[in-house]
Image (tube, helix red, strand yellow):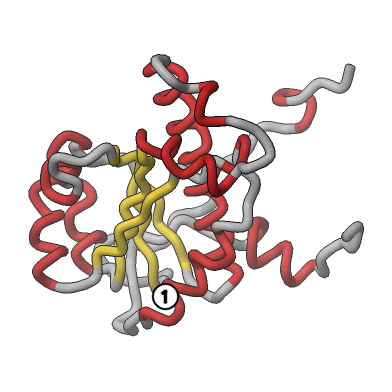
Amino acid sequence: MGKILPDQSLDILFRQARTHRAWADKPVSDTILEAVWELAKMGPTSANCSPARVVFVKSPEAKERLRPCLSRGNVAQTMAAPVTAILAYDLAFVDHLPRLYPEEDARSWFVGNAALIEETAFRNGTLQGAYLILAARALGLDCGPMSGFDRAKVDAAFFPGSTVRSNFLCNLGYGDPDGAPKKLRPRGPRLSFDEACRIL
C-alpha cells in the first residue's frame, strides 16, 4: 500500500461526490450491485464481525412496500431512484464469529451481553454502510443516503421476525443534477481541521 490515489479518484470518492435526490432514467444492474458489495465487504470491522446486511430494493413491488415507511420528503426521490439500499445490521452476527474470526473465541465476548451486541452491531454496521457508499461511488454510481424513514415499519416490512435491524437508507443510481424532484444544491460548508480535529 502507501500509494496515494490520483486527484481524479479523490474527486470521485470525496471532493466532487454529492448527495443526489434526482435520478436519470437508467437502470442499475444486479452485477454492479454485487460488485459494490464485493468491495464494501473488504472494509475493516472489529474482530471482522461484519454485521451489515443490505437489501437492494429495486423491483416496483419492493419499492411500493418501502413507500409507506418513508418520510414525506423522501418519497418522490426514493420512488424515482433505480435502487434503494436498506443498510441494516444483524444482532446475530456473533454466530458467524467462529468462521470470521477463528483466531480467538470471539463469540464468548458477547454471550449474555445484549448491550455490547447492539453497540458492536450498530457501530460496525454503520462503518460498513459508509464503505458501501464509497464502493458505489468508485463503481460509477451516485448515492443519496438518508435517515428520513420509520425504522420499525422498515423492519416489519423487510426483516419480520428476524435479528436484523435497519440503520439508514441510500438511494443508488445515476444522478441527474438538474432533474426533479430536487436539483442538486450547492455543497454545504464543512468544518475546518482546526474546528474538528486535534493532534496530541
Q: x, y percentage for residue 38?
A: 54, 67
- The one of 137 and 36 positioned closer to us in this rendering: 36
Where is residue 79, by image quadrant? bottom left
Q: x, y percentage for residue 86?
A: 31, 52
Where is residue 191, by image quadrant? top right
Where is residue 40, by image quadrant? bottom right
Q: x, y percentage for residue 35?
A: 51, 74
Residue identified by numbered label 1? 174
> What residue appears at the point 44 percent right and 61 percent down from the top-left corner?
143
Please identify the quadrant where the N terminus is shown.
Answer: bottom right
- The one of 145 and 176 positioned closer to us in this rendering: 145
Q: x, y percentage for residue 135?
A: 56, 63
Label 1 SS: loop
> What residue appears at the point 14 percent right and 64 percent down from the top-left corner?
62
Up/down of 33 relative to 130, above or below: below
Q: Is residue 72 left or right of residue 58?
A: left
> What residue appears at the point 36 percent right and 55 percent down from the top-left corner?
54
> What residue appears at the point 77 percent right and 31 percent down from the top-left corner?
193
Up/down of 155 relative to 138, above or below: above
- The one of 139 and 39 positioned closer to us in this rendering: 39
Q: The disc labelled 1 sits on which kind of residue?
A: Tyr
